């Protein structure tokens, strides 16, 4: 056992209810990568090693519970067109699928790792990564294997869209049958883009069929729901006990009622609304109804090419009227709940010692200093 004492923490956010908020002048001890003690610096026990953070604020490392980091190609021209009036439809996904299928494992691995490193340089210590840019059995398996190299939180998203030139019913049968069977050993989760308004994505019945097959194959469930229009995604996610329903941009009273008191987290992805110039989800309505909310980046080449959780916090506070406390909690503990993890997203004793160290005196600076790289990941 090696114990590691971290001192010089100007403000420590733990999500430990014993403290009722961030602790000033705090210290933390980890043993073999697990938090064993947090408290006031003056009470800190001795340890084998010591690191002084010089007054930095510390929060739990960000848990980015929704990304699509395994892809090749570039869609910056699509983004530029959107900024002068084009609407996001999901049609650009085909461009990424073609580039991804053509890329070698080494190329995909290098890109993926660069993005994971980029996220870490902004304080992310846990990442979920989806497939969904292969849309054939071999490439979907390849993407999940590569994602598995960097995270246990891998998600099979064969039901992202129906690929060009493939019959809808045939594709659905492939996803539910051979593709799921080949992918399930490499995935913890399955996800589906449930969006009846999009001719490319899946309606409620199709999404239900995919999710039920995935659950029968032993996968946990997640849903892309209610992104582009009202629809059945949220209620389906709640009904099937999904861990999370993500986007939640177009939400009805029934959707809010279904989410409140359910075990399904509403994951908001404000980088998507920012990068597609769309209306933001009504975070206040969800929070005020008691819904558990997570914030994630959705980093992907189409709707939000950013790995920055601090940016998501700044957008949540500025554009969605979440308090800074709510936003930081949603980006850490909320993400952990969306992944059904109790060992990350907080810094109570027993947690993994995954920290985000801020070059700032308070967690408030995450929203107060938008675009400034003040956060970095530190795994003890
Ligand atoms: O989460 N909504 C569907 N999927 C992605 C975007 C995929 C893309 O455009 O490449 C999302 O926004
Ligand atoms: Fe997504």
Image (cartoon, grey):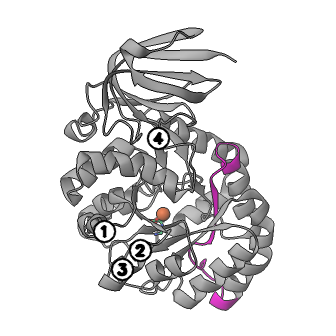
Q: Are marks 1 and 3 in contact (CB under 8 Å)?
A: no
Q: Are marks 2 and 1 in contact (CB under 8 Å)?
A: yes
Disc 3 target residue? 257
User: Residue 286 bears which disc, if any?
Assistant: 1
Q: How many angstroms separate mark 1 from mark 3 (CA)?
A: 9 Å
Disc 2 target residue? 259
Q: Disc 1 or 4, which lies upstream in sequence?
A: 1
Q: Disc 3 or 4, which lies upstream in sequence?
A: 3
Q: Quadrant of the N terminus?
A: top right
Q: Residues within 10 Å of mark 4 (few under 14, many from 20)?
A: many
Residue bounds of the magenta highlight: 147-169
Q: Can you say whether 366 is above or below 96 in the image?
A: above
Residue at x 75%, y 65% (from the top left corner) = 184
Disc 4 target residue? 346
Q: Residues within 10 Å of mark 1 (few under 14, many from 20)?
A: many
Q: Quadrant of the C terminus?
A: top right
Q: Can you say whether 205 is above or below 314 in the image?
A: below
């Amino acid at each position: 056992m090696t114990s590691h004492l971290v001192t010089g923490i100007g403000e420590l956010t733990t999500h430990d209810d014993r403290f009722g908020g961030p602790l000033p002048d705090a210290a933390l001890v980890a043993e073999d990568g697990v938090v064993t003690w947090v408290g006031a610096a003056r009470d800190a026990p001795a340890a084998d090693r010591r690191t002084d953070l010089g007054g930095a604020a510390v929060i739990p490392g960000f848990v980015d519970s929704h990304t699509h980091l395994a892809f090749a190609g570039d869609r910056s021209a699509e983004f530029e067109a959107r900024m002068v009036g084009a609407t996001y439809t999901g049609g650009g996904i085909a461009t990424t699928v073609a580039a991804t299928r053509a890329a070698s494992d080494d190329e995909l691995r290098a890109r993926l790792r660069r993005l994971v490193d980029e996220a870490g340089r902004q304080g992310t210590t846990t990442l979920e990564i989806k497939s969904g840019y292969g849309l054939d059995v071999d490439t979907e398996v390849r993407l999940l294997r590569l994602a598995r190299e960097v995270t246990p939180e891998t998600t099979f998203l064969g039901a992202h869209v129906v690929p060009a030139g493939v019959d809808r019913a045939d594709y659905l049968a492939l996803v539910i049958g051979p593709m799921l069977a080949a992918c399930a050993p490499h995935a913890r989760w399955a996800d589906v883009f449930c969006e009846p308004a999009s001719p490319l994505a899946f309606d409620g019945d199709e999404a239900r069929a995919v999710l039920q097959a995935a659950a029968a194959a032993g996968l946990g469930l997640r849903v892309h729901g209610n992104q582009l229009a009202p629809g059945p995604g949220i209620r389906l996610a709640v009904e099937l006990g999904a861990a999370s329903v993500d986007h939640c941009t177009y939400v009805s009273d029934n959707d809010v009622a279904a989410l409140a008191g359910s075990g399904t987290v509403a994951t908001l992805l404000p980088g998507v609304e920012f990068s597609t110039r769309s209306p933001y989800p009504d975070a206040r309505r969800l929070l005020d109804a008691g819904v558990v909310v997570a914030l994630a980046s959705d980093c992907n080449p189409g709707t939000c090419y950013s790995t920055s959780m601090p940016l998501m916090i700044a957008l949540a506070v500025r554009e969605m009227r979440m308090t800074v406390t709510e936003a930081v909690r949603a980006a850490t503990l909320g993400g952990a709940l969306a992944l059904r993890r109790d060992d990350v997203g907080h810094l109570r004793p027993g947690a993994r010692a995954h920290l985000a160290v801020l070059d700032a005196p308070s967690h408030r600076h995450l929203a107060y200093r938008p675009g400034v790289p003040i956060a970095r990941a530190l795994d003890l």
